[in-house]
Image: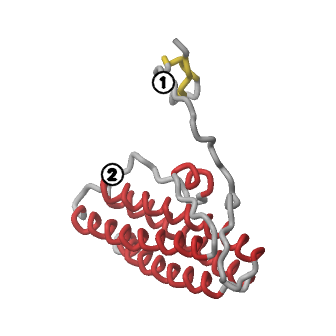
Amino acid sequence: MARTTTSKKDGRARPRPARARPVVRETVPEIRSSAPARLYATKNDLSEATRTEVISLLNQRLAESIDLQTQCKQAHWNVKGPAFIGLHKLFDDINEDVEQYVDLIAERIVQLGGIAEGTVGAVEGRSTLPDYPLALSTGAEHVAALSDALAAFGRTARMGIEEMNELEDAGSADLLTGISRGIDKWLWFVEAHQQANG
């Protein structure tokens, strides 16, 4: 049996038996690309070069919005404590809006002739949001972690607005402006829970 190592708290590695994995034959080659595999024809008057760059940048924002959505659900599912009901609902409300942002960004990519790359692998490879700690339980811990994620996403959305303005894509800049406003609202709602205690 093959062995792998895991780290102990003292930093030394210890052997651990690896689980046997079933052999899976790949029938479809794995595609991992930061650029769209294909640019579809459209009568949109943005140049092909501009659309290609916008699509790449929007796929970055798409990965981050999907990551943010999963972090909202992580908080929603796992929050505990005296503020459970209010935070459970708040985190779900945020998730619903973020789900709409995901869809808006993905649809904009496709409108420009691109391919929306929203798989787990694409998200994992692209998202710049901080990793969400999995062992959190208290409301205060989830509020702190989710406020970090919302703030990071808000920053990337504003960067995206600047990028779209430089590329003269007013439609994508407007889309990200609306998303940025929504994220700022939700950050305010989440941070209010920290400010009441500090």
Mark 1, secondary structure of its residue: loop
| Residue ranking furthest to the top | 1
Looking at the image, residue 12 lies above or below residue 189: above
Where residue 114 sits, quadrant-wise, is bottom right
Which labelled disc corresponds to residue 86? none
Where residue 71 sits, quadrant-wise, is bottom left
Looking at the image, residue 132 lies above or below residue 153: above
Q: How far apart are the two marked residues, 2 and 1, measured between alpha carbons?
A: 32 Å
Which labelled disc corresponds to residue 21? 1
Give the side of residue 159 with respect to residue 182, left or right.
Answer: right
Q: Position of residue 99 (x, y in %)?
A: 41, 68
Q: Nearer the viewer, residue 89 or 83?
A: 89
Q: Position of residue 140 (x, y in %)?
A: 36, 61
Quickly name the residue at label 2.
137
Q: Amino acid at mark 1?
A: Arg
Residues tagged 2 and 1 counted as in contact (Cβ below 8 A): no
User: Label 2: how many residues lie within 10 Å, few (<14), some (14-19) or many (20+)?
Assistant: some
Where residue 159 sits, quadrant-wise, is bottom right
Q: Residue at x 53, y 59 (%)?
A: 118
* Foreground disc of the pair 2, 1: 1
User: Label 1: how many residues lie within 10 Å, few (<14), some (14-19) or many (20+)?
Assistant: few
